[in-house]
Structures are given as structure tokens and as C-alpha cells.
């Protein structure tokens, strides 16, 4: 029989066995937990791999598809790269012809780069050609008229329309009257497409302006895809960039526009009676200076005086809400030139380009323009005797006494608006 000491010793051994088994179980539990975590992570990574693989295959398919549509980009600052005289004078047809000649010139240059050895320009003559010409139409059209290259400020729109329609990917775009409008458009498109695998080559027409140097400098001597397109002037610093340079004399002028204008007036296109000419009168000219007839006769060269010899304005009637809406839509893009449309002359011509709209405005739009200007008080009030004054001399707001919200002083309220006398420009009464 075992003694007490032996039994106690066996008891201790048994407890040691239990503790050892428990440690083993704890290790097994921890291993199972780690395995479950690793298994879940594996499944997650496997799913990610499948997604990434699918996305990579999709990108590869798109990349292969893009490689089937390579193109050449031609960027032109149209404010300084001026199309040839005969093209501009030909209007719409000139624009179509300019697009065709520019396309042919680009194709010829691409053919010269395909040397039959390098694969970079293999098949370059089959690449599509994308052209973007950006310009301030208001300023450029006025400059072209002054230079005698176009008769009307609307002729540039006709030329640009022909150019845009002439080729599928050609656009001549109005960049607005902002100082750097064209510059901003050119920079953004260049930055967007220089990284595109589809864009195989860029012809850059902006060598006149040193401001573009910062755009091109990061690519100097390392990017053979850029060609400088020279026209009127090419600053010497562009030559240091190391890009090849070409000219396109069939399309662009080699000389800048003359500083002095050849014509002092801008002609307003005639409007037929069928196009809302409510007075039944065409646009008229006097002494070689175009002067539009006034809507409802208001712009006739007369001044209406009441019984106290104070100048008064007759009410403008017949303006529709639609007309006011059309006017707002028009000036949201570019404000009308008051002097040009109401007086037939522009103070900006011929010395500089006018930043306002000289395009045709129908009689109702002229009336809305008058209405808005008459809401601003003439500084001379009833004593004004200027035939060129288009501001208001009487407040026509019903019930207004010159309080808050009225731009007129109290003196021009309550005047009799019935004209007793009429002063004509010739001086007769």
C-alpha cells in the first residue's frame, strides 16, 4: 500500500499533467484563431486580386482600343496667329478652305517624320487631326475690320463657322473677352492631352508669347512629340527649347496686322423686313458712318421738350417679356456696345479693339437696351440738348417720387411728358 507521501506526490504529478494539457489546449486555440484570421485575410486578398486583375484587363483592353485612334493635336492662339488675307475675305468658304489647307499641311509634316525606320511615327499620315484655335472674337473681329480684311464684325463668325465645319475635329472657338482667355484654354488642353497615349504629337502655335515658355519648358529636349508652329513672330527663347519648328504659309500670315486701321467704321449687316423690323425700315447709313434706325423711332435725331423747355422721354411700348429674356441671355455672354447699336459709331474704333458686342441686334433688343439705359439718369437732366444722349431724363416708374430704389432725383419726377416742341439735329424746331 502506498503511503501518504507517495499519494501526495502522485497527486502533484497529476495536477502537473492537467496544467500541461491545458497549456497545449490554449496553444491549439490560439493557433485556430490565427488560422481563422489568416484564412479571412487570404479570402480578402484573393478577392482584391480578382478585382485588380479584372480592372487591369479592362484597362489593357481600353489601352489597346485607344491605340487604334491616335491623333495629332494642333493648338493655336488665334489672337496672334492670323489667317491669310484671301481666306479671311472669303468668309465661310474661306474658313472651309483654311481647314482643308491646314489639314494637308499637318499630314505632309507627319509624312516627313515617318522615316520608315522608327516605329514612333509609323502610319502617322493616317492619324486623326484635332485642331483648336482660340481667340477673343470681339477684339479680333474689330482688328480685322480695321485692317480691311473683313467688312463686318460678324464676318469672323462666318469664317470660324466654316473652319469648324470644314473638318470633323476642327474648332475655332471664342475664348471670350478676358485678357488671358485663349491662354487659359490652350494651357488646360495641353496639360490634359500631353499625357494621353492617344495624342501622338502636338503642334503648338503660340511662339509669339513668352508666357507659354513655362508650359513648354518641362518638356524641352526630352519630348520629341512637340513641334513649334511659327507664324508672325517667334521669340528667340522658344528656339532654346530644342523643339523642331515649322511654318504654314498657306494658312497663316507671316506679317502681323498693321497697327493703324484702314477703315474707321464697322458696317452693320442689313436686316430685311422679314426679320422683326417693326418699323419697316432697313438699317441706314449717313455720310459713310453706319447708323441704325431707332426702334419705334426713338433714335431719330430729335429732342422732345415739354411746355417748360425741359427734355422729356416718350415711353417705350411694345417690349415683350420674351424680348427682355432674350436680351439678358445675349448680354450674359457679352454686353452690347451702347454707342455702336444706338448711335452707329463706336468710340473704340479705329484706335483699339472694342470689347463689347457689335453683332446684329433686332429692333426689340434695341428697345430693351434703350429701356435699361433710360433707367439711369442723365446728369444734365431736363437741360440736356445732346442728340447722342441715350440716358433717361424723366422717371417713368408709376407712382415713383424719387425715393429709395430710384436712380433719379426728385426734380425729374412729375414732369409733363407731353412734348410741345421738337428739336431736330439740323437745328429746326
Image (spheres, rainbow, N blue to C red):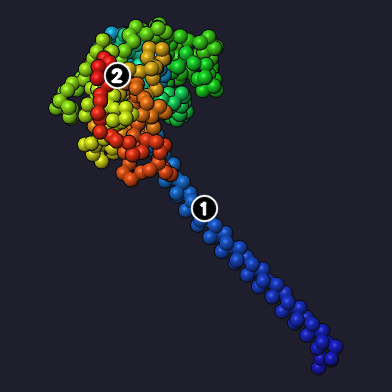
Residue 225 is drawn in which quadrant? top left
Tag 2 residue? 344
Q: What residue is rendered at 37% in x and 14% in y?
A: 349
- Residue 71 on image: x %, y %: 36, 24
Question: Which quadrant of the figure contains the N terminus?
Answer: bottom right
- Residue 75 on image: x %, y %: 40, 21
Q: 10 Å neighbourhood of mark 2: few (<14), some, or many (≥20)?
A: many
Q: Are marks 1 and 2 in contact (CB under 8 Å)?
A: no
Tag 1 residue? 45
Q: Is residue 233 visible?
A: yes
Residue 370 is drawn in which quadrant? top left
Q: Is residue 2 left or right of residue 161?
A: right
First in residue order: circle 1 vs circle 2: 1
Front tag of 1 and 2: 2
Q: How many angstroms separate mark 1 from mark 2 (CA)?
A: 75 Å
Q: Is residue 2 placed above or below 79 in the rendered structure?
A: below
Q: What residue is rendered at 28% in x and 8% in y?
A: 86
Q: What residue is rendered at 39% in x and 22% in y?
A: 355
Q: Is residue 217 left or right of residue 118?
A: right
Q: What residue is rendered at 45% in x and 29% in y?
A: 188
Which residue is more in the foreground, 45 or 340?
340
Q: Is residue 121 visible?
A: no
Which residue is more in the foreground, 251 or 64?
251
Residue at the front extreme, as displayed: 308
Q: Is residue 19 left or right of residue 212?
A: right
Residue 105 is drawn in which quadrant? top left
Question: Which quadrant of the figure contains the C terminus?
Answer: top left
- Residue 2 on image: x %, y %: 81, 91
Q: Is residue 228 placed above or below 170 in the rendered structure?
A: above
- Residue 191 on image: x %, y %: 47, 28
Q: Is residue 226 placed above or below 296 in the rendered structure?
A: above
Q: Is residue 354 placed above or below 42 in the rendered structure?
A: above
Amino acid at each position: 500500500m502506498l503511503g501518504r507521501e507517495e499519494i501526495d506526490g502522485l497527486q502533484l504529478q497529476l495536477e502537473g499533467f492537467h496544467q500541461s494539457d491545458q497549456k497545449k489546449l490554449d496553444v491549439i486555440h490560439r493557433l485556430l484563431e490565427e488560422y481563422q484570421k489568416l484564412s479571412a485575410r487570404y479570402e480578402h486578398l484573393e478577392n482584391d486580386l480578382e478585382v485588380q486583375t479584372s480592372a487591369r484587363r479592362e484597362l489593357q483592353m481600353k489601352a489597346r482600343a485607344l491605340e487604334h485612334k491616335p491623333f495629332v493635336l494642333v493648338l493655336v492662339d488665334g489672337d496672334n496667329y492670323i489667317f491669310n488675307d484671301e481666306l479671311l475675305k472669303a468668309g465661310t468658304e474661306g474658313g472651309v478652305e483654311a481647314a482643308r489647307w491646314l489639314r494637308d499641311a499637318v499630314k505632309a509634316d507627319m509624312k516627313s517624320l515617318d522615316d520608315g525606320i522608327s516605329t514612333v511615327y509609323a502610319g502617322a499620315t493616317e492619324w486623326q487631326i484635332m485642331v483648336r484655335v482660340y481667340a477673343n472674337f470681339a477684339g479680333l473681329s474689330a482688328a480685322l475690320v480695321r485692317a480691311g480684311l473683313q467688312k463686318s464684325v460678324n464676318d469672323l463668325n462666318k469664317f470660324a463657322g466654316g473652319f469648324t465645319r470644314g473638318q470633323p475635329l476642327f474648332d475655332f472657338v471664342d475664348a471670350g473677352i478676358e485678357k488671358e482667355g485663349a491662354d487659359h484654354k490652350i494651357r488646360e488642353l495641353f496639360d490634359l492631352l500631353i499625357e494621353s497615349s492617344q495624342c501622338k504629337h502636338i503642334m503648338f502655335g503660340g511662339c509669339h508669347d513668352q508666357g507659354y515658355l513655362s508650359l513648354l519648358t518641362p518638356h524641352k529636349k526630352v519630348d520629341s512629340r512637340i513641334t513649334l508652329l511659327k507664324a508672325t513672330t517667334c521669340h528667340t527663347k522658344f528656339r532654346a527649347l530644342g523643339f523642331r519648328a515649322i511654318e504654314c504659309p498657306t494658312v497663316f500670315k507671316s506679317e502681323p496686322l498693321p497697327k493703324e486701321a484702314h477703315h474707321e467704321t464697322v458696317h452693320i449687316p442689313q436686316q430685311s423686313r422679314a426679320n422683326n423690323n417693326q418699323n419697316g425700315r432697313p438699317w441706314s447709313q449717313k455720310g459713310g458712318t453706319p447708323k441704325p434706325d431707332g426702334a419705334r423711332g426713338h433714335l431719330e435725331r430729335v429732342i422732345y421738350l415739354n411746355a417748360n423747355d425741359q427734355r422729356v422721354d416718350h415711353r417705350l411700348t411694345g417690349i415683350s417679356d420674351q424680348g427682355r429674356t432674350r436680351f439678358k441671355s445675349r448680354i450674359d455672354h457679352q454686353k452690347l456696345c451702347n454707342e455702336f447699336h444706338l448711335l452707329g459709331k463706336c468710340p473704340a474704333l479705329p484706335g483699339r479693339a472694342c470689347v463689347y458686342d457689335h453683332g446684329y441686334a433686332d429692333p426689340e433688343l434695341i428697345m430693351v437696351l434703350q429701356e435699361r439705359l433710360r433707367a439711369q439718369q442723365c446728369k444734365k437732366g431736363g437741360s440736356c440738348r445732346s442728340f447722342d444722349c441715350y440716358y433717361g431724363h424723366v422717371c417713368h416708374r408709376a407712382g415713383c417720387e424719387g425715393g429709395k430704389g430710384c436712380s433719379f432725383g426728385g426734380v425729374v419726377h412729375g414732369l409733363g411728358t407731353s412734348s410741345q416742341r421738337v428739336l431736330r439735329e439740323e437745328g429746326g424746331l
